Amino acid sequence: MNTATIRQHLHNYLDIANDKKLKAIYVMVEDELKESITEYTDELKAELDQRVAYYLDGGAMVSSAEMGQRIQAIRKKRK
């Protein structure tokens, strides 16, 4: 069974598992969950808010395809 299938099975199971089993699973991964929590600085939050406001006000955006091309061009220059 591949990882994507396992992940889907676990997602589905967590929706129906009883409280006792959910708590047991949580205890097994609790430390990893705490380590993976991302905390954003006030500076980053302000920057993200500014970018959202720019977008909502009709600011010019770059498509993902265009951004991919730009990134590839930068990578080629670095080589």
Image (cartoon, rainbow, N blue to C red):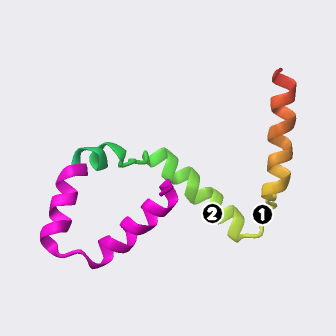
Q: Is residue 55 left or right of residue 45?
A: right
**Magenta span dominant secondary structure:** helix
Residue 5 percent across, percent down from the top left: 49, 63
- Residue at the (49%, 53%) spot, across then down: 45
Instruction: Return the residue at label 2.
Output: 52
Is 4 in the magenta? yes
Instruction: Return the residue at label 1.
Output: 59
Q: Is residue 36 left or right of residue 4?
A: left
| Residue type pointed to by label 1 | Gly
Residue 62 percent across, percent down from the top left: 81, 56
Q: Are marks 1 and 2 in contact (CB under 8 Å)?
A: no
Which of disc 2 and disc 1 is earlier in sequence? 2
Of 67 and 57, the residue lying toward us:
67
Estimate the spatial distance between the alpha carbons at disc 1 and disc 2, rounded to whole Å: 9 Å
The magenta segment: 1-29
Instruction: Reply above or below: 14 against 2.
Output: below
| Residue type pointed to by label 2 | Val
- Residue at the (15%, 60%) spot, across then down: 24
Q: What residue occupies the far bottom of the structure in this picture?
A: 16
Of 27 and 36, the residue lying toward us:
27
SS at circle 2: helix
- Residue at the (17%, 67%) spot, across then down: 21
Instruction: Reply above or below: 62 against 38.
Output: below
Residue 73's quadrant in the figure?
top right
Of 75 and 59, the residue lying toward us:
75
Residue 52 percent across, percent down from the top left: 63, 63
Is 21 in the magenta? yes
| The C terminus - image quarter | top right
- Residue at the (80%, 40%) spot, across then down: 71
